[in-house]
Image (cartoon, rainbow, N blue to C red):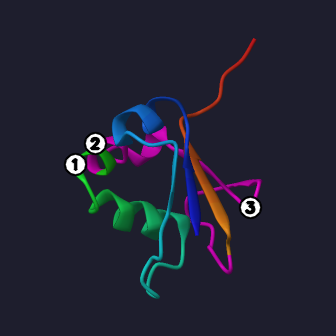
Amino acid sequence: MRILYFAWVRERIGVADEEVSPPSGVTTVAALIDWLGGTSAGHAQAFADRGRLRAAVDGDFVGLDAPLGAAREVAIFPPVTGG
């Protein structure tokens, strides 16, 4: 599974993307974030406040409670604002 990070999430983790193989019990975006949060101090810092995170699974915006299913790509980013 490819994980993409954007904006300050990327800055805190230190990479723009990574390939991961989460354990079988990781079945939702929230569970993925919890699991990733334990992989490094940067991940833990980036994911400390889940309320500040948004996600997309295979290009579709989803809530953090969304199932991963057979996702090939998950993007994690802060709320998007624009003008």
Residue, far top:
83
Is residue 72 toward the left or the right of residue 4 in the image? right
Mark 3 residue crowding within 10 angstroms, few (<14) / some (14–19) / many (20+): some
The stretch in magenta equals: 44-70
State the SS at label 2: helix
**Which numbered tag is attached to residue 7?**
none
- Mark 1 belongs to which amino acid? Ala
Inspect the magenta stretch and tell me whether residue 59 lies in it: yes
- Residue 34 x %, y %: 36, 63
Location of the C terminus (image quadrant): top right
Is residue 62 toward the left or the right of residue 49 in the image? right
Nearer to us in this view, 14 or 29: 14
- Residue 63 x %, y %: 62, 56
State the SS at label 3: loop
Residue occupied by mark 2: 45
Mark 1 residue crowding within 10 angstroms, few (<14) / some (14–19) / many (20+): few
- Mark 2 belongs to which amino acid? Gln
Of pointers 1 and 3, the one earlier in the residue sequence: 1
Query: Are the residues at dot 1 and dot 2 in contact (C-beta closer than 8 Å)?
Result: yes
- Residue 50 x %, y %: 42, 48
| Residue 82, above or below 27 | above
- Residue 42 x %, y %: 28, 44
Query: Are the residues at dot 1 and dot 3 in contact (C-beta closer than 8 Å)?
Result: no
Query: Alpha carbon of mark 1 to alpha carbon of mark 3: how far?
Result: 26 Å
User: What residue is at 42 percent from the left and 83 percent from the top?
Assistant: 23
Residue occupied by mark 3: 58
- How many marks are shown on the rendered structure? 3
